[in-house]
Amino acid sequence: MAEIITAAEAAALIRDGDSVYFGGSGGGHAVPEDLIDALRNRHLKTGTPRGLTLTSSVSLGDWATTGFNKLAYATLLRRVISGGFNNCPAIAALAISDEIEAYTLPQGALSQLSRDMAAGRPGLLTKTGLHTFVDPRHGGGKQSPRTQEDLVKLVEIDGEEFLLYRAIPVDITIIRGSVADERGNISMEDEAFLGENFSLAAAAHLHGGIVIAQVQRLAASGSLKGKDVKVPGALVDYVVLAPDQRQTYQTAYNPAFAGHMRVPDSEVQAIPFDIRKVIARRAAMELFPGAVVNLGFGVSNGISSVAAEEGFYRDLTLTVEQGIIGGVPAGGKNAGAGVNFDMLAPQPDQFDFYDGGGLDIAFLSFAEVDRRGNVNVSRYGSSINGPGGFINISQGARKIVFSGTLTTGGLDVRPDGKGGLILDRDGAVAKWMPKVQQLTFSGDYALERGQEVVFVTERAVFQLTAEGIVLTEVANGISVDSDVLARIEFPVRVAPDLRPMEPRLFRAERMNLFADFHARPPALRHRRDHSQHRDTQ
Protein backbone atom coordinates (compact mmCIF):
# COMPACT_ATOMS: atom_id res chain seq x y z
CA MET A 1 0.00 0.00 0.00
CA ALA A 2 1.38 3.39 -1.03
CA GLU A 3 2.31 5.82 1.71
CA ILE A 4 0.91 9.37 1.68
CA ILE A 5 3.70 11.87 2.27
CA THR A 6 4.36 15.57 1.72
CA ALA A 7 6.14 16.95 -1.33
CA ALA A 8 9.12 17.87 0.86
CA GLU A 9 9.32 14.32 2.20
CA ALA A 10 9.20 13.00 -1.35
CA ALA A 11 12.05 15.27 -2.45
CA ALA A 12 14.11 14.01 0.51
CA LEU A 13 14.01 10.50 -0.99
CA ILE A 14 16.18 11.58 -3.96
CA ARG A 15 19.89 10.87 -3.42
CA ASP A 16 23.02 12.28 -5.01
CA GLY A 17 23.61 10.84 -8.48
CA ASP A 18 20.07 9.45 -8.91
CA SER A 19 18.47 9.09 -12.32
CA VAL A 20 15.05 10.78 -12.06
CA TYR A 21 12.42 10.48 -14.80
CA PHE A 22 9.53 12.99 -14.74
CA GLY A 23 6.23 12.33 -16.50
CA GLY A 24 4.13 15.06 -18.06
CA SER A 25 4.16 17.14 -21.21
CA GLY A 26 4.95 20.61 -22.43
CA GLY A 27 2.90 23.40 -20.94
CA GLY A 28 1.98 21.74 -17.64
CA HIS A 29 -0.04 18.80 -18.97
CA ALA A 30 0.12 16.20 -16.15
CA VAL A 31 3.37 17.77 -14.89
CA PRO A 32 4.00 17.05 -11.15
CA GLU A 33 4.85 20.69 -10.45
CA ASP A 34 4.59 20.48 -6.65
CA LEU A 35 7.32 17.84 -6.63
CA ILE A 36 9.50 19.93 -8.93
CA ASP A 37 9.07 22.82 -6.48
CA ALA A 38 9.99 20.59 -3.55
CA LEU A 39 13.14 19.29 -5.26
CA ARG A 40 14.27 22.83 -6.08
CA ASN A 41 13.54 24.05 -2.54
CA ARG A 42 15.48 21.21 -0.97
CA HIS A 43 18.50 21.82 -3.17
CA LEU A 44 18.50 25.55 -2.49
CA LYS A 45 18.18 24.97 1.25
CA THR A 46 20.60 22.06 1.73
CA GLY A 47 22.73 21.90 -1.41
CA THR A 48 21.51 18.37 -2.00
CA PRO A 49 20.86 16.26 -3.97
CA ARG A 50 23.68 16.77 -6.46
CA GLY A 51 24.67 15.27 -9.78
CA LEU A 52 21.23 14.11 -10.90
CA THR A 53 20.34 12.71 -14.30
CA LEU A 54 17.04 14.37 -15.16
CA THR A 55 14.90 12.89 -17.95
CA SER A 56 11.55 13.75 -19.53
CA SER A 57 10.01 12.53 -22.78
CA VAL A 58 8.68 16.01 -23.49
CA SER A 59 10.15 19.41 -22.70
CA LEU A 60 8.56 20.61 -19.43
CA GLY A 61 7.87 24.28 -18.71
CA ASP A 62 6.00 27.41 -19.73
CA TRP A 63 8.91 28.80 -21.79
CA ALA A 64 9.89 30.95 -18.78
CA THR A 65 9.84 29.95 -15.12
CA THR A 66 7.99 26.66 -14.51
CA GLY A 67 8.81 22.98 -15.00
CA PHE A 68 12.46 22.14 -15.52
CA ASN A 69 13.34 25.85 -15.52
CA LYS A 70 13.09 25.58 -11.72
CA LEU A 71 15.73 22.85 -11.66
CA ALA A 72 18.35 24.58 -13.81
CA TYR A 73 21.28 24.48 -11.37
CA ALA A 74 24.63 23.04 -12.40
CA THR A 75 25.10 21.90 -8.79
CA LEU A 76 21.86 19.89 -8.93
CA LEU A 77 22.26 18.39 -12.39
CA ARG A 78 24.91 16.32 -14.11
CA ARG A 79 22.90 15.30 -17.16
CA VAL A 80 19.55 16.20 -18.77
CA ILE A 81 17.86 14.01 -21.40
CA SER A 82 14.66 15.28 -22.98
CA GLY A 83 12.64 15.57 -26.15
CA GLY A 84 13.49 19.26 -26.07
CA PHE A 85 14.55 22.33 -24.12
CA ASN A 86 12.21 24.80 -25.82
CA ASN A 87 9.81 24.91 -22.85
CA CYS A 88 12.71 25.18 -20.41
CA PRO A 89 15.24 27.70 -21.77
CA ALA A 90 17.05 27.78 -18.41
CA ILE A 91 18.17 24.18 -19.06
CA ALA A 92 19.21 25.15 -22.58
CA ALA A 93 21.35 27.94 -21.11
CA LEU A 94 23.24 25.42 -18.95
CA ALA A 95 23.88 23.29 -22.04
CA ILE A 96 25.06 26.26 -24.09
CA SER A 97 27.49 27.27 -21.35
CA ASP A 98 28.67 23.62 -21.11
CA GLU A 99 27.76 23.29 -17.44
CA ILE A 100 25.81 20.04 -17.88
CA GLU A 101 25.70 17.01 -20.16
CA ALA A 102 22.70 17.53 -22.45
CA TYR A 103 20.86 15.32 -24.92
CA THR A 104 17.76 16.14 -26.93
CA LEU A 105 16.27 13.00 -28.48
CA PRO A 106 13.05 12.45 -30.43
CA GLN A 107 10.01 12.69 -28.16
CA GLY A 108 8.50 9.59 -29.71
CA ALA A 109 11.67 7.55 -29.31
CA LEU A 110 11.90 8.45 -25.62
CA SER A 111 8.21 7.73 -25.12
CA GLN A 112 8.49 4.31 -26.79
CA LEU A 113 11.80 3.63 -25.02
CA SER A 114 9.98 3.79 -21.68
CA ARG A 115 8.20 0.54 -22.60
CA ASP A 116 11.48 -1.17 -23.46
CA MET A 117 12.95 0.04 -20.19
CA ALA A 118 9.97 -1.37 -18.31
CA ALA A 119 10.49 -4.73 -20.05
CA GLY A 120 14.21 -4.83 -19.26
CA ARG A 121 15.24 -4.66 -22.91
CA PRO A 122 18.52 -2.98 -23.88
CA GLY A 123 16.84 -0.18 -25.78
CA LEU A 124 14.54 0.90 -28.59
CA LEU A 125 15.30 -0.27 -32.13
CA THR A 126 13.83 2.09 -34.75
CA LYS A 127 14.55 3.91 -37.98
CA THR A 128 13.38 7.19 -36.43
CA GLY A 129 16.23 9.68 -36.42
CA LEU A 130 18.32 8.25 -39.24
CA HIS A 131 20.08 11.02 -41.20
CA THR A 132 19.32 13.65 -38.54
CA PHE A 133 21.40 15.13 -35.73
CA VAL A 134 20.46 12.23 -33.42
CA ASP A 135 22.11 9.77 -35.83
CA PRO A 136 25.59 9.07 -34.35
CA ARG A 137 27.08 10.08 -37.70
CA HIS A 138 25.66 13.58 -37.13
CA GLY A 139 26.15 14.06 -33.39
CA GLY A 140 24.01 11.50 -31.56
CA GLY A 141 21.65 14.10 -30.04
CA LYS A 142 24.40 15.67 -27.93
CA GLN A 143 23.93 19.37 -27.17
CA SER A 144 26.95 20.42 -25.11
CA PRO A 145 30.71 19.87 -25.54
CA ARG A 146 31.08 17.88 -22.30
CA THR A 147 28.44 15.39 -23.48
CA GLN A 148 30.48 12.37 -24.56
CA GLU A 149 28.59 9.13 -23.85
CA ASP A 150 26.79 7.65 -26.84
CA LEU A 151 23.12 7.05 -26.02
CA VAL A 152 22.26 6.24 -29.65
CA LYS A 153 23.94 3.51 -31.70
CA LEU A 154 23.78 2.82 -35.44
CA VAL A 155 23.11 -0.86 -36.14
CA GLU A 156 22.49 -2.90 -39.29
CA ILE A 157 20.03 -5.79 -39.58
CA ASP A 158 19.72 -7.73 -42.83
CA GLY A 159 21.35 -4.87 -44.69
CA GLU A 160 19.03 -2.18 -43.27
CA GLU A 161 20.11 0.64 -40.97
CA PHE A 162 18.45 1.23 -37.61
CA LEU A 163 19.13 3.30 -34.52
CA LEU A 164 19.30 1.74 -31.07
CA TYR A 165 18.32 4.20 -28.33
CA ARG A 166 19.91 2.77 -25.21
CA ALA A 167 17.82 2.12 -22.11
CA ILE A 168 18.15 4.71 -19.32
CA PRO A 169 18.32 3.24 -15.80
CA VAL A 170 15.67 4.85 -13.58
CA ASP A 171 16.08 5.24 -9.81
CA ILE A 172 13.10 7.54 -9.26
CA THR A 173 9.95 8.00 -11.35
CA ILE A 174 7.78 11.04 -10.58
CA ILE A 175 4.37 11.11 -12.25
CA ARG A 176 1.01 12.85 -11.88
CA GLY A 177 -2.59 11.67 -11.87
CA SER A 178 -5.99 12.93 -10.83
CA VAL A 179 -6.95 10.56 -8.00
CA ALA A 180 -5.18 7.97 -5.85
CA ASP A 181 -7.06 5.47 -3.77
CA GLU A 182 -5.74 4.24 -0.43
CA ARG A 183 -3.87 1.39 -2.14
CA GLY A 184 -2.02 3.80 -4.45
CA ASN A 185 -3.97 3.05 -7.63
CA ILE A 186 -3.77 6.14 -9.85
CA SER A 187 -6.45 7.44 -12.23
CA MET A 188 -6.10 10.30 -14.73
CA GLU A 189 -9.69 11.23 -15.54
CA ASP A 190 -9.13 14.99 -15.25
CA GLU A 191 -5.88 15.13 -17.23
CA ALA A 192 -5.44 16.48 -20.75
CA PHE A 193 -2.57 14.03 -21.37
CA LEU A 194 -1.97 10.36 -20.53
CA GLY A 195 1.69 10.01 -21.47
CA GLU A 196 3.56 6.85 -20.50
CA ASN A 197 3.06 6.78 -16.74
CA PHE A 198 2.58 3.02 -16.45
CA SER A 199 5.82 2.28 -18.32
CA LEU A 200 7.80 4.84 -16.32
CA ALA A 201 6.54 3.39 -13.06
CA ALA A 202 7.32 -0.15 -14.22
CA ALA A 203 10.84 0.90 -15.30
CA ALA A 204 11.63 2.24 -11.83
CA HIS A 205 10.06 -0.85 -10.24
CA LEU A 206 12.29 -3.10 -12.39
CA HIS A 207 15.42 -1.36 -11.10
CA GLY A 208 14.30 -1.45 -7.46
CA GLY A 209 13.62 2.27 -7.63
CA ILE A 210 10.93 4.50 -6.16
CA VAL A 211 7.69 5.66 -7.78
CA ILE A 212 6.11 8.89 -6.51
CA ALA A 213 2.71 10.05 -7.77
CA GLN A 214 1.31 13.55 -7.32
CA VAL A 215 -2.51 13.62 -7.36
CA GLN A 216 -5.26 16.10 -6.63
CA ARG A 217 -7.60 13.89 -4.60
CA LEU A 218 -7.59 10.78 -2.43
CA ALA A 219 -10.29 8.08 -2.70
CA ALA A 220 -11.25 5.10 -0.57
CA SER A 221 -9.66 1.74 -1.35
CA GLY A 222 -11.58 -0.10 -4.03
CA SER A 223 -13.63 2.90 -5.13
CA LEU A 224 -11.81 3.48 -8.44
CA LYS A 225 -13.04 1.54 -11.46
CA GLY A 226 -10.37 -0.81 -12.74
CA LYS A 227 -10.66 0.58 -16.28
CA ASP A 228 -9.95 4.07 -14.97
CA VAL A 229 -6.72 3.09 -13.23
CA LYS A 230 -3.68 3.98 -15.34
CA VAL A 231 -0.96 2.99 -12.83
CA PRO A 232 -1.66 0.18 -10.35
CA GLY A 233 -0.90 0.61 -6.69
CA ALA A 234 1.53 -2.32 -6.88
CA LEU A 235 3.92 0.02 -8.71
CA VAL A 236 3.38 3.15 -6.59
CA ASP A 237 5.42 3.69 -3.43
CA TYR A 238 4.37 7.18 -2.36
CA VAL A 239 1.48 9.53 -3.04
CA VAL A 240 1.66 13.32 -2.66
CA LEU A 241 -1.58 15.30 -2.49
CA ALA A 242 -1.69 18.57 -4.42
CA PRO A 243 -5.27 19.89 -4.21
CA ASP A 244 -4.47 23.00 -6.25
CA GLN A 245 -2.71 21.31 -9.19
CA ARG A 246 -3.68 22.83 -12.54
CA GLN A 247 -4.65 20.92 -15.66
CA THR A 248 -2.05 22.92 -17.62
CA TYR A 249 0.05 25.94 -16.71
CA GLN A 250 -2.46 28.15 -18.52
CA THR A 251 -5.72 26.39 -17.60
CA ALA A 252 -6.90 25.48 -14.11
CA TYR A 253 -9.41 22.99 -15.45
CA ASN A 254 -11.34 22.58 -18.69
CA PRO A 255 -13.71 19.58 -18.74
CA ALA A 256 -13.46 19.47 -22.54
CA PHE A 257 -9.67 18.95 -22.28
CA ALA A 258 -10.42 15.91 -20.08
CA GLY A 259 -13.02 14.60 -22.52
CA HIS A 260 -15.90 15.07 -20.05
CA MET A 261 -17.86 17.31 -22.40
CA ARG A 262 -17.94 18.50 -25.99
CA VAL A 263 -18.00 22.19 -26.82
CA PRO A 264 -20.19 23.70 -29.56
CA ASP A 265 -18.43 24.81 -32.71
CA SER A 266 -19.25 28.40 -31.78
CA GLU A 267 -16.83 28.14 -28.85
CA VAL A 268 -13.89 27.14 -31.06
CA GLN A 269 -12.34 30.57 -31.42
CA ALA A 270 -11.06 31.84 -34.74
CA ILE A 271 -7.48 33.04 -34.66
CA PRO A 272 -6.82 36.76 -35.27
CA PHE A 273 -6.49 37.93 -38.85
CA ASP A 274 -2.77 38.50 -39.21
CA ILE A 275 0.19 37.04 -41.05
CA ARG A 276 0.12 33.84 -38.98
CA LYS A 277 -3.46 33.25 -40.05
CA VAL A 278 -2.49 33.80 -43.69
CA ILE A 279 0.14 31.06 -43.39
CA ALA A 280 -2.21 28.71 -41.52
CA ARG A 281 -4.88 29.26 -44.16
CA ARG A 282 -2.53 28.48 -47.05
CA ALA A 283 -1.28 25.38 -45.27
CA ALA A 284 -4.89 24.30 -44.65
CA MET A 285 -5.47 24.40 -48.40
CA GLU A 286 -3.31 21.26 -48.60
CA LEU A 287 -5.92 19.29 -46.62
CA PHE A 288 -8.27 16.80 -48.25
CA PRO A 289 -11.27 14.71 -47.15
CA GLY A 290 -10.50 11.84 -44.82
CA ALA A 291 -6.90 12.91 -44.21
CA VAL A 292 -5.23 11.88 -40.96
CA VAL A 293 -3.19 14.89 -39.95
CA ASN A 294 -0.61 15.96 -37.37
CA LEU A 295 -0.42 19.59 -36.31
CA GLY A 296 2.89 20.74 -34.92
CA PHE A 297 3.59 23.63 -32.56
CA GLY A 298 3.81 27.22 -33.77
CA VAL A 299 2.08 28.54 -36.89
CA SER A 300 0.72 25.05 -37.66
CA ASN A 301 -1.32 25.20 -34.46
CA GLY A 302 -3.68 27.60 -36.19
CA ILE A 303 -4.71 25.09 -38.86
CA SER A 304 -7.19 23.40 -36.53
CA SER A 305 -8.90 26.74 -35.93
CA VAL A 306 -9.02 27.42 -39.67
CA ALA A 307 -10.53 23.98 -40.34
CA ALA A 308 -13.16 24.62 -37.66
CA GLU A 309 -13.90 28.13 -38.91
CA GLU A 310 -14.29 26.88 -42.48
CA GLY A 311 -16.56 24.05 -41.35
CA PHE A 312 -14.67 20.92 -42.36
CA TYR A 313 -12.70 19.84 -39.29
CA ARG A 314 -15.06 16.87 -38.82
CA ASP A 315 -14.26 15.63 -42.32
CA LEU A 316 -10.66 14.79 -41.43
CA THR A 317 -8.82 13.52 -38.38
CA LEU A 318 -6.60 16.08 -36.68
CA THR A 319 -4.05 14.71 -34.22
CA VAL A 320 -1.20 15.88 -32.00
CA GLU A 321 1.63 13.74 -30.78
CA GLN A 322 0.66 13.92 -27.11
CA GLY A 323 -2.30 11.64 -27.92
CA ILE A 324 -5.21 13.71 -29.26
CA ILE A 325 -7.02 11.94 -32.14
CA GLY A 326 -9.87 13.83 -33.79
CA GLY A 327 -11.62 16.99 -32.69
CA VAL A 328 -9.84 20.34 -32.47
CA PRO A 329 -6.34 20.44 -30.99
CA ALA A 330 -5.72 23.34 -28.62
CA GLY A 331 -3.49 26.22 -29.63
CA GLY A 332 -0.98 28.48 -27.93
CA LYS A 333 0.47 27.38 -24.61
CA ASN A 334 -2.26 24.76 -24.21
CA ALA A 335 -0.94 22.95 -27.30
CA GLY A 336 -0.97 19.22 -26.71
CA ALA A 337 -4.51 19.29 -25.34
CA GLY A 338 -7.68 19.32 -27.43
CA VAL A 339 -11.47 19.41 -27.39
CA ASN A 340 -14.14 17.21 -28.99
CA PHE A 341 -11.57 14.48 -29.60
CA ASP A 342 -12.48 10.93 -30.59
CA MET A 343 -9.73 9.43 -28.45
CA LEU A 344 -6.99 10.40 -26.05
CA ALA A 345 -4.28 7.82 -26.67
CA PRO A 346 -1.26 7.02 -24.51
CA GLN A 347 1.68 8.86 -26.03
CA PRO A 348 3.72 5.75 -27.03
CA ASP A 349 0.71 4.37 -28.93
CA GLN A 350 0.34 7.63 -30.85
CA PHE A 351 3.98 7.49 -31.93
CA ASP A 352 3.64 3.83 -32.96
CA PHE A 353 0.88 4.98 -35.29
CA TYR A 354 2.98 7.86 -36.62
CA ASP A 355 6.09 5.75 -37.15
CA GLY A 356 4.03 3.12 -38.97
CA GLY A 357 2.96 5.60 -41.65
CA GLY A 358 -0.44 6.46 -40.22
CA LEU A 359 -0.23 10.15 -41.12
CA ASP A 360 -1.37 11.33 -44.54
CA ILE A 361 0.01 14.80 -43.94
CA ALA A 362 1.99 16.60 -41.25
CA PHE A 363 2.15 20.34 -40.69
CA LEU A 364 5.37 21.48 -39.04
CA SER A 365 7.35 24.66 -38.52
CA PHE A 366 10.85 25.50 -39.72
CA ALA A 367 13.61 27.69 -38.34
CA GLU A 368 16.17 27.11 -41.11
CA VAL A 369 16.01 25.60 -44.60
CA ASP A 370 18.97 24.85 -46.85
CA ARG A 371 19.52 24.19 -50.53
CA ARG A 372 18.96 20.41 -50.17
CA GLY A 373 15.62 20.89 -48.49
CA ASN A 374 17.05 20.07 -45.07
CA VAL A 375 15.22 21.67 -42.15
CA ASN A 376 16.47 22.72 -38.73
CA VAL A 377 14.17 23.33 -35.76
CA SER A 378 16.37 21.87 -33.00
CA ARG A 379 19.31 24.26 -32.58
CA TYR A 380 19.88 27.61 -34.22
CA GLY A 381 21.53 30.86 -33.22
CA SER A 382 21.88 30.75 -29.44
CA SER A 383 18.79 28.55 -28.90
CA ILE A 384 18.53 24.82 -28.18
CA ASN A 385 14.98 23.68 -28.79
CA GLY A 386 15.47 20.00 -29.44
CA PRO A 387 13.30 18.00 -31.83
CA GLY A 388 10.21 17.25 -29.73
CA GLY A 389 7.98 15.06 -31.88
CA PHE A 390 9.27 16.64 -35.10
CA ILE A 391 11.53 13.78 -36.22
CA ASN A 392 9.00 11.00 -35.69
CA ILE A 393 6.30 13.04 -37.40
CA SER A 394 8.33 14.27 -40.37
CA GLN A 395 9.81 10.85 -41.07
CA GLY A 396 6.51 9.01 -40.71
CA ALA A 397 4.12 11.18 -42.76
CA ARG A 398 3.42 10.69 -46.45
CA LYS A 399 3.43 14.44 -47.01
CA ILE A 400 5.01 17.25 -44.98
CA VAL A 401 4.04 20.91 -45.11
CA PHE A 402 6.59 23.18 -43.43
CA SER A 403 5.20 26.58 -42.46
CA GLY A 404 6.78 29.84 -41.33
CA THR A 405 7.81 33.32 -42.40
CA LEU A 406 10.46 33.62 -45.09
CA THR A 407 12.66 35.87 -42.93
CA THR A 408 12.84 36.85 -39.27
CA GLY A 409 14.33 39.59 -37.11
CA GLY A 410 12.20 42.71 -37.35
CA LEU A 411 9.92 41.45 -40.11
CA ASP A 412 6.90 43.73 -40.56
CA VAL A 413 4.45 42.32 -43.10
CA ARG A 414 0.66 42.37 -43.22
CA PRO A 415 -2.22 41.27 -45.41
CA ASP A 416 -3.63 44.20 -47.34
CA GLY A 417 -7.22 43.03 -46.84
CA LYS A 418 -7.77 43.00 -50.63
CA GLY A 419 -5.83 40.02 -51.96
CA GLY A 420 -2.14 40.54 -51.38
CA LEU A 421 0.63 41.51 -48.97
CA ILE A 422 2.19 44.75 -47.81
CA LEU A 423 5.85 44.33 -46.85
CA ASP A 424 6.67 47.33 -44.66
CA ARG A 425 10.04 46.01 -43.47
CA ASP A 426 11.74 42.74 -44.30
CA GLY A 427 13.40 40.63 -41.66
CA ALA A 428 17.10 41.17 -41.09
CA VAL A 429 17.81 37.47 -40.57
CA ALA A 430 17.72 34.96 -43.41
CA LYS A 431 16.13 31.58 -42.63
CA TRP A 432 17.02 30.00 -46.00
CA MET A 433 20.76 29.37 -46.11
CA PRO A 434 23.31 27.15 -47.89
CA LYS A 435 23.57 24.75 -44.93
CA VAL A 436 21.45 24.42 -41.78
CA GLN A 437 23.15 24.61 -38.38
CA GLN A 438 21.63 21.33 -37.19
CA LEU A 439 19.98 18.60 -39.26
CA THR A 440 16.49 17.87 -37.93
CA PHE A 441 15.01 16.81 -41.28
CA SER A 442 16.87 15.43 -44.31
CA GLY A 443 15.50 16.49 -47.68
CA ASP A 444 17.51 13.81 -49.49
CA TYR A 445 16.18 11.07 -47.19
CA ALA A 446 12.61 12.33 -47.72
CA LEU A 447 12.97 12.21 -51.50
CA GLU A 448 14.57 8.76 -51.29
CA ARG A 449 11.52 7.53 -49.37
CA GLY A 450 9.02 9.14 -51.74
CA GLN A 451 7.68 11.81 -49.38
CA GLU A 452 6.09 14.98 -50.75
CA VAL A 453 7.51 18.16 -49.18
CA VAL A 454 5.96 21.65 -49.41
CA PHE A 455 7.14 24.92 -47.83
CA VAL A 456 4.49 27.56 -47.08
CA THR A 457 5.48 31.12 -46.17
CA GLU A 458 3.54 34.35 -45.94
CA ARG A 459 4.77 35.51 -49.34
CA ALA A 460 5.61 32.37 -51.34
CA VAL A 461 5.12 28.61 -51.62
CA PHE A 462 7.84 26.12 -52.59
CA GLN A 463 8.07 22.43 -53.50
CA LEU A 464 11.04 20.10 -52.89
CA THR A 465 12.01 18.14 -56.00
CA ALA A 466 14.91 15.94 -57.04
CA GLU A 467 16.34 18.99 -58.84
CA GLY A 468 16.10 21.17 -55.74
CA ILE A 469 13.61 23.63 -54.27
CA VAL A 470 11.14 25.17 -56.72
CA LEU A 471 9.13 28.38 -56.22
CA THR A 472 5.53 27.62 -57.23
CA GLU A 473 3.43 30.54 -55.86
CA VAL A 474 4.01 34.15 -54.88
CA ALA A 475 1.71 36.67 -53.17
CA ASN A 476 0.33 39.69 -54.97
CA GLY A 477 2.32 42.78 -53.99
CA ILE A 478 5.55 40.80 -53.64
CA SER A 479 8.50 40.98 -56.07
CA VAL A 480 9.81 37.55 -57.03
CA ASP A 481 13.33 38.87 -57.48
CA SER A 482 13.82 41.34 -54.60
CA ASP A 483 11.37 40.00 -51.99
CA VAL A 484 11.79 36.25 -52.50
CA LEU A 485 14.85 35.12 -54.46
CA ALA A 486 17.12 37.83 -53.00
CA ARG A 487 16.17 36.72 -49.47
CA ILE A 488 17.27 33.12 -50.07
CA GLU A 489 21.00 32.43 -49.82
CA PHE A 490 21.07 29.70 -52.47
CA PRO A 491 19.66 29.29 -55.98
CA VAL A 492 15.97 28.44 -56.22
CA ARG A 493 14.28 27.42 -59.45
CA VAL A 494 11.14 29.28 -60.49
CA ALA A 495 8.35 27.09 -61.81
CA PRO A 496 7.42 27.88 -65.41
CA ASP A 497 3.77 27.98 -64.30
CA LEU A 498 4.40 30.23 -61.29
CA ARG A 499 1.02 31.42 -60.03
CA PRO A 500 -0.26 33.96 -57.50
CA MET A 501 -1.20 32.82 -54.01
CA GLU A 502 -4.97 32.65 -53.51
CA PRO A 503 -6.24 36.25 -52.95
CA ARG A 504 -8.78 35.05 -50.36
CA LEU A 505 -5.88 34.29 -48.01
CA PHE A 506 -5.29 38.00 -47.50
CA ARG A 507 -8.87 39.06 -46.78
CA ALA A 508 -10.35 39.19 -43.30
CA GLU A 509 -13.60 37.40 -44.08
CA ARG A 510 -13.92 33.63 -44.01
CA MET A 511 -12.43 32.01 -47.13
CA ASN A 512 -15.36 29.63 -47.73
CA LEU A 513 -13.00 26.69 -48.25
CA PHE A 514 -15.65 24.04 -47.58
CA ALA A 515 -16.44 23.41 -51.27
CA ASP A 516 -12.76 23.58 -52.29
CA PHE A 517 -11.88 21.08 -49.59
CA HIS A 518 -14.53 18.57 -50.68
CA ALA A 519 -13.51 18.94 -54.32
CA ARG A 520 -10.11 17.45 -53.59
CA PRO A 521 -9.49 13.70 -53.96
CA PRO A 522 -10.01 11.88 -50.64
CA ALA A 523 -7.27 10.06 -48.75
CA LEU A 524 -6.19 6.87 -50.51
CA ARG A 525 -4.48 4.12 -48.57
CA HIS A 526 -3.34 0.63 -49.39
CA ARG A 527 -5.93 -1.61 -47.76
CA ARG A 528 -6.86 -5.22 -48.19
CA ASP A 529 -9.88 -5.63 -50.49
CA HIS A 530 -12.82 -6.81 -48.39
CA SER A 531 -15.44 -6.53 -51.13
CA GLN A 532 -15.36 -10.12 -52.42
CA HIS A 533 -15.50 -11.60 -48.94
CA ARG A 534 -18.28 -9.19 -47.95
CA ASP A 535 -20.37 -10.03 -51.03
CA THR A 536 -20.34 -13.76 -50.25
CA GLN A 537 -21.77 -13.37 -46.76
Image (spheres, grey):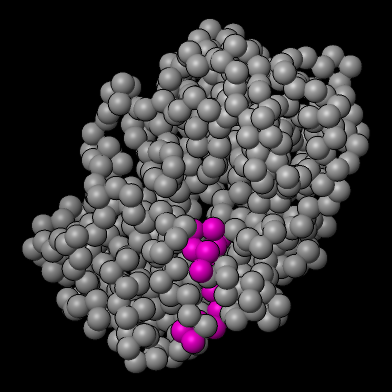
**Among the 4 quarters of the image, the one containing residue 50:** bottom left
Q: Furthest residue to the left? A: 220
User: Is residue 83 in the magenta section?
Assistant: yes
Q: Is residue 203 above or below residue 344?
A: below
Residue 78 location in percent, x, y?
Answer: 54, 83
User: Is residue 36 in the magenta section?
Assistant: no
Residue beneath the point at 72% across and 31% down: 454
Residue beneath the point at 54% across and 58% down: 86
Answer yes or no: is residue 352 visible.
yes
Q: Nearer the viewer, residue 382 or 229?
A: 382
- Quadrant of image for the N terminus: bottom left
Q: Nearer the viewer, residue 254 or 1?
A: 254
Residue 232 location in percent, x, y?
Answer: 27, 65
Answer yes or no: is residue 118 visible.
no
Residue beneath the point at 28% across and 23% down: 264
**Which stretch is magenta?**
75-90
Q: Is residue 114 left or right of residue 49?
A: right
Residue 101 location in percent, x, y?
Answer: 61, 78
Q: Nearer the viewer, residue 281 or 29?
A: 281
- Quadrant of image for the C terminus: top left
Q: Is residue 195 left or right of residue 252?
A: right
Residue 123 location in percent, x, y?
Answer: 59, 69
Q: Is residue 516 left or right of residue 348?
A: right
Residue beneath the point at 54% across and 48% down: 352
Q: Is residue 49 above or below residue 186?
A: below
